[in-house]
Amino acid sequence: MADNLLYARLAEHLRRQIRRGQLRAGERLPSLRRLGRMQGVSVATAVEAYMQLEREGLIEARSRSGYYVRSSTMPLPTAGAMHRISRTPQAVRNPVLLGVLDVLAREDVLPLHAATPSPELLPCAALAATTTRVLRRNPDTALGYAPPQGIADLRKRIAWRYAQCGVDVDADEIIVTAGGMEAISLALRTVTQRGDVVVLETPTYYGLLQAVAALGLRVIEVPNLPGTGIDATRFAELLDRHVVRAAVLIPNFNNPMGSLTGDGDKRAIVAACAAHGVVLIEDDLYGELAYSGERPSPLRRFDEHGCVLTCGSFSKSLSPGLRVGWVLGANRTSDLLRAKCFSTVATATLPQLAVADYLSRHDFERALRRLRRALADNVQRCRDAIARHWPEDTRVSEPGGGLALWVELPQPIEGQALFDAALTHGIGTLPGHLFSSRGDYRHHLRLSCGLPWSTRIESALRELGALAGRQLR
Ligand SMILES: Cc1ncc(COP(=O)(O)O)c(C=O)c1O
């Protein structure tokens, strides 16, 4: 038979196996030599067949590892829960968080629930050395109060990092906070009053739901859509229809969806806020963790009217325990600074000095590159394992950055039931309903990919798949 027909036939054979699920997403394909032997064709024909399937997006070559069935052939989560979005502002009604997090604090639990990179992926040794050096060199300063706004050298370095991605930030508008969460709380406390309406995404990070609930605010929700991020059209409609005080959004790699909102939509969201006098609180904790290495723009880049308050943190890139975050105060810096003073007087001095010293002496970019590579690899392998071991019809997000995977389970599997069952096997996950203001996403689970890949994780994912399968039966 002519060579070109041979390769087309072989490609068709493999294509059919993939479509029928005989070759599952994430599965490693035979080497070229082996495929050739198995099918009685030359290596060149096997190469042609794989190249054809690669062009069709069905398989991918991974460097030094071979060919795999693409796990992106797995379907993304549906926007199904979205049609239940309430049309009127409502209080947050989902008070279950503390109970869940208490259970997960157990040390014998594999932390697939914790959205933090594991210490092996962070420059912990350099940070330890820098902390010791700072303390030894200047104990009086390190153990005294820091200025309420934060240490000037650290603020300059944060401003410089924004300049690198084309965003003009004045160090004098930066307030250093105890992590990103304090930055968001300060911003909310400064611009809202009890009973005000705020827009949140759905799904969204449970910490935002808790902060909004604690301040007695009411919520309307805008969908965060799988693959495309915040629905900018719906967002603008909400602002037309309701009197909204603020929005708290995660445009760069939303937790838990992992989606990235495009620049066009970001621009439209900022413009809608400017037109309606809405304060836009941007939670940009994951912007530095784009797997491509290309940092996506913060909303602040599109802000010509000072309506965006960008909140950031070193929790996901250097250390969650140092608790160093910040808010860019724009024209609300003095109000935010007053709130900061009343809240904690100042952020702890030693961690601020340590981070500033680390940034001055070490190659942060290199550490970030290593972290991004590891996260991208973990996400890929976790998706592959889910494709192989979880029930058919499981859907999973395909994030381009961050730490989270958002899994939609086939009904009737309940995220909470799977969470409970997994815990009895020493595996931590988070049930999807934590990410909703009204306990939606009952068939979802969030997994974190912050642990370096290991056989333990692979077997935990296999175990989770088996537990899910049991619930399906
Ligand atoms: C989207 C988002 N915002 C804020 C936070 C809180 O960050 P920090 O630990 O810096 O307070 C987290 C932590 O997981 C998060 O995922």
Image (cartoon, grey):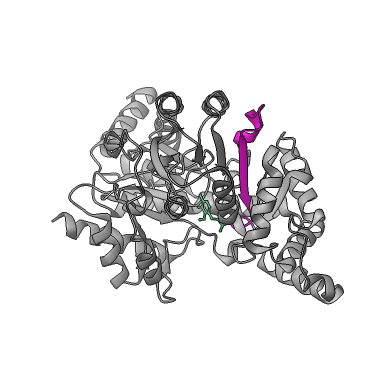
Choose between 193 and 281: the one closer to the eye. 193
Choose between 44 and 211: the one closer to the eye. 211
Task: Give residue 396's position: percent from left, percent from top.
Answer: 35, 45
Q: Quadrant of residue 137?
A: bottom right
Question: Is residue 335 one of those drawn in magenta?
Answer: no
* Left or right of residue 321, residue 361 in this image: right
Residue farthest to the left, as pictured:
473
**How many discs appear?**
0
Task: Give residue 88's position: percent from left, percent from top.
Answer: 32, 35
Task: Give residue 66's position: percent from left, percent from top.
Answer: 47, 46
In this rendering, does residue 325 appear at all?
A: no
Residue farthest to the front, as pictured:
194
Task: Give residue 108's position: percent from left, percent from top.
Answer: 41, 76
The residue under the point 64% across, 29% down is 303
The quadrant of the image that shows the C terminus is bottom left
Residue range of the region highlighted in magenta in the rendering:
296-317
In the image, is residue 234 above or below residue 221? above
* Left or right of residue 338, residue 4 in this image: left
The residue under the point 47% across, 50% down is 208
Question: Is residue 298 one of those drawn in magenta?
Answer: yes
The quadrant of the image that shows the N terminus is top left
In this rendering, does residue 174 appear at all?
A: yes
Choose between 216 and 261: the one closer to the eye. 216
The residue under the point 77% across, 56% down is 359
The residue under the point 38% across, 38% down is 220
Residue farthest to the right, as pictured:
137
In the image, is residue 91 above or below residue 349? above
